[in-house]
Image (cartoon, grey):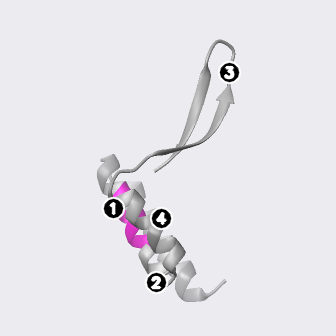
Amino acid sequence: MNPDKQKEIVDYLKRVHVANKESTKKEHFKDLLNRLYAGDKDIQKTINAISSGAETTVVNIPREDRIHHLVLC
């Protein structure tokens, strides 16, 4: 892996570790994606979906008495 990308990931993990709000963690994650995948149009669509708060059911996971929905933000 590219050393610059490794540094970005390590820095991201440090920031997320000290973040105490989900919204802050989400912003750090979006920032990481932008840094790692700058210029990739397909990834930008996913980042935009995250930014707009879109949730899409990816898979329904059967559980004992209900179905658990895994969502992609």
* Label disc, if present, on residue 36 of the rendered structure: none
Q: Which residues are magenta?
A: 26-33
Q: Quadrant of the N terminus?
A: bottom right
In the image, residue 71 lies at what x, y percent?
52, 42
- Distance Cα–Cα, label 3 vs label 2: 38 Å
Mark 3 vs mark 1: in front: 3
3 or 4: tag closer to the N-terminus: 4
Residue type at the position of mark 2:
Ala
Badge 2 local density, few (<14 within 10 Å), some, or many (20+)? Answer: few
Residue to which mark 1 is pinned? 27
- Distance Cα–Cα, label 2 vs label 1: 16 Å
Residue to which mark 4 is pinned? 46
4 or 2: tag closer to the N-terminus: 2
In the image, residue 69 lies at what x, y percent?
57, 33
Query: Is 49 rendered above or below residue 59?
Result: below
Q: Nearer the viewer, residue 5 or 39?
A: 39
Residue type at the position of mark 4:
Thr
- Distance Cα–Cα, label 4 vs label 2: 12 Å
Q: Residue furthest top?
A: 65
Residue to which mark 3 is pinned? 63
2 or 1: tag closer to the N-terminus: 1
| Residue drawn at point x = 67 percent, y = 31 percent | 61
- Distance Cα–Cα, label 4 vs label 1: 14 Å
Mark 4 vs mark 1: in front: 4
Residue type at the position of mark 3:
Arg
3 or 1: tag closer to the N-terminus: 1
Looking at the magenta stretch, what is its main secondary structure?
A: helix
